Image (cartoon, rainbow, N blue to C red):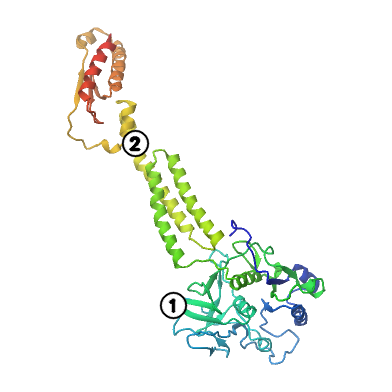
Amino acid sequence: MRWRGTAEAAPEIVVVAIDARSVDALGQWPWPRAVLADLIRRIHSDGARVIALDILFSEPERGCRIAGAESAPGGRGAWDARAGAGQERGAERGAGGEQVAVTPPGGFPAVPDYPGVETNIDSLAAATPHAGHFVIRPDVDGTVRWYSLVLRHRGEFYPSLALRASSAFLGGAPISLHPYEGNLPQIRLGELQVPASERGELLVNFRGRYERTFPYISAVDLLDGRVPAGALRDRLVFLGATETGIGDLRTTPMDLAAPGVEVHATVADNLIHARFVRSTAVQTLQGILAMFLLGPVAALIAGASRRPAAGAAGAILLLAAYAGIAQTSFSRGNVHLPAVLPLAAGALAYAASTVHRNVFVEAKARLIRKTFQQYVSVPVVEEMLRDPDKVRLGGERRVLTVLFSDIRGFTSMSERLEPERVVALLNDYLTPMTRVIIDAGGTLDKYMGDAIMALFGAPVQQADHAARACAAALAMRGVLA
């Protein structure tokens, strides 16, 4: 989402913020209910179509008696969920007397269950038929990516604040739940099918950084008349806290600290304009296929390249190509292709192939070099490295040519010379003789005093091994002079 950058946001949504300036001017939160009433009255008088309060009134204001609710909170407010058309069995009454969206018996067990809830006081809850929960559950890393469109309480399902606000903004578009692919909940907003997970959650399509997407109006500016008339006309207005000290801050893919009201407004944007991130079973299957393909292909590239740097470059290009496809699919089509697992599978497969190559293949190559580079020519060593299987350490039966050479009368000669002189003479003789053999493609087998034994046709096969041995013998005679 950060790489995609800021995207278009719903112009119909405005946030009236209980921000730091407002708290400085009006005093610490919570404010007196009269102040909030005045604020709501001003939003309404400016022509707002819907006002969504990201605020819970769970008890009467201190020092005041509100009709119908002395001190006992209760009633239906936060869980009031009006049933929609097209349900399986029609609308029914929930645990608190409210209407709920009916589901098949035993349906949607994965939707989180909340056995206890905190509701608005009766007198305020009765003022509107629309209310919804504002639970925002982060992922295990503390980042908000999914939004609970519905939650379960006492066996029934209740919508969220953003879902209810969007329903009201769209003229009372009914909210309903239907079974989809067994026990998956299909959430409908009017005729719109909302792609939700088995937990009833929406993958939030954040539009940009906090305060760079939706218009934010300071509550104190609205109360003091510093907002142009008509700025809220026909808008969906979210009223919520953004002041840091109030503590309603969330980590999102776009911000380390964004207010919860930004999340609700973003979900309403997604619902009103059907701006959904497609992350269905189809994309999951595509991700699984990519995971099983990227790994073998990355390993093949690493293993097929003779140069480690070229293998690494090829594997990196392959993984970068898939990352680019995933990013383009998201940025241009709002399609979420799984990226982490396929890329991790490709990287791990490449790493495993490289380790195998270094530990086994390259170790064998180092063994071949160490074993043969003093006894055969460089081209022969390179040919052996190109196909290490040609070197069969267990031995094999083969037709080849063996060359033996000896210094005539060396025994009697060595008896007449000092030992140091014998060693120097052998060094002077054996070094050029060995070079001739190696240059002819032969393999030095051993020295036996003044004698040399060499092989032609092994370890690498040579069709002309006999001719090579004869040529080497003649060349040795020539060098001996």
Q: Nearer the viewer, residue 124 or 178?
A: 178
In the rendered image, residue 459, in percent from the top left (x then y), is placed at 25, 31
Crowd tier of the residue under label 2, counting other residues whose Cα lies within 10 Å: few below 14, some 14–19, many 20 or above: many
In the rendered view, does 99 fall on the left or right side of 10?
left
Q: Residue at x 18, y 32 (%)?
A: 398
In the rendered image, residue 10, in percent from the top left (x then y), is placed at 65, 69
First along the sequence among labels 2 and 1: 1
Q: Residue at x 45, y 43 (%)?
A: 312
The furthest residue to the top: 416
Residue type at mark 2?
Answer: Ala
Q: Quadrant of the image for the C terminus?
A: top left
In the rendered image, residue 59, in percent from the top left (x then y), is placed at 68, 84
Q: Give the secondary structure at mark 1.
A: loop
Q: Nearer the viewer, residue 228 or 398?
A: 228
Q: Residue 352: in sight, yes or no?
A: no
Residue type at mark 1?
Answer: Asn
| Residue wearing tag 1 | 183
* Label at residue 348: none
Q: Give the secondary structure at mark 2.
A: helix
Give residue 367's quadrant in the image.
Answer: top left
Mark 2 near mark 1, Cβ–Cβ under 8 Å? no
- Vertical side of 128 occupied by 20: above or below: above
| Residue wearing tag 2 | 365
Q: Quadrant of the image for the N terminus?
A: bottom right
The furthest residue to the bottom: 68
Crowd tier of the residue under label 1, counting other residues whose Cα lies within 10 Å: few below 14, some 14–19, many 20 or above: some
Mark 2–mark 1 distance (CA, rounded to whole Å): 57 Å
Q: Nearer the viewer, residue 36 or 168?
A: 168
Q: Residue at x 44, y 77 (%)?
A: 183
In the rendered image, residue 309, in percent from the top left (x then y), is placed at 45, 40
Give residue 161's quadrant in the image.
Answer: bottom right
